[in-house]
């Protein structure tokens, strides 16, 4: 299947709470973008979710994002990928991500962030057959 992502900044911002709005393997940005945030603690360290957390931080700083409407990379996403997206450690990382995102969103979206976090934890804790259907 093809993972569809929002194309314009406004829609990318809306998708952020629900799922990662960028296809990580295809992201390109100017080095100056990150250089502008010269704090050594700028890059978020949430194992497995660094990119998602980084987008949250940059979007909260009014950085504009854009996705292109063409597929540039094909990625194999078999059962092993789905198996990695589960287990106790992965669930803890998802919870850490939700707390991290909470620092960068408007307060009115906090309840939605919590609800989506709960739903994502349930999805990641699901058996493989259910995860396959959720990812479709």
Image: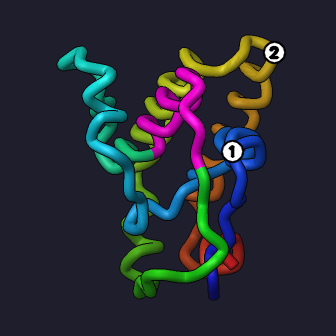
Residue of label 1: 9
Residue of label 2: 108
Choose mark 2 or mark 1, whichever is in front: 1
Residue at x 76%, y 42% (from the top left corner): 10
Q: Position of residue 73 (x, y in %)?
A: 43, 82
Q: Magenta includes 57?
A: yes
Callout 2 secondary element: helix
What segment is highlighted magenta in the picture? 52-65
Quadrant in which residue 5 is drawn = bottom right
Quadrant where the N terminus sits is bottom right
Q: Position of residue 49 (x, y in %)?
A: 39, 45
Residue at x 65%, y 21% (from the top left corner): 105
Quadrant in which residue 75 is drawn = bottom left
Q: Is residue 59 above or below residue 12?
A: above
Q: Is residue 55 left or right of residue 41?
A: right
Quadrant in which residue 9 is drawn = top right
Residue at x 38%, y 50% (from the top left corner): 29
Quadrant where the C terminus sits is bottom right
């Amino acid at each position: 299947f093809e993972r569809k992502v929002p194309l314009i900044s406004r829609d990318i911002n809306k998708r952020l709470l629900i799922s990662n709005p960028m296809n990580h393997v295809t992201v390109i940005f100017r080095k100056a973008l990150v250089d502008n945030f010269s704090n050594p603690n700028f890059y978020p360290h949430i194992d497995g979710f660094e990119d998602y957390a980084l987008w949250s931080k940059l979007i909260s700083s009014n950085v504009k994002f854009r996705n292109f409407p063409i597929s540039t990379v094909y990625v194999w996403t078999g059962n092993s990928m789905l198996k990695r997206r589960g287990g106790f450690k992965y669930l803890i990382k998802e919870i850490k991500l939700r707390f991290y995102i909470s620092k960068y969103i408007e307060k009115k979206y906090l309840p939605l962030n919590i609800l989506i976090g709960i739903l994502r934890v349930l999805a990641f804790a699901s058996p493989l057959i259910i995860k396959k259907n959720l990812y479709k």
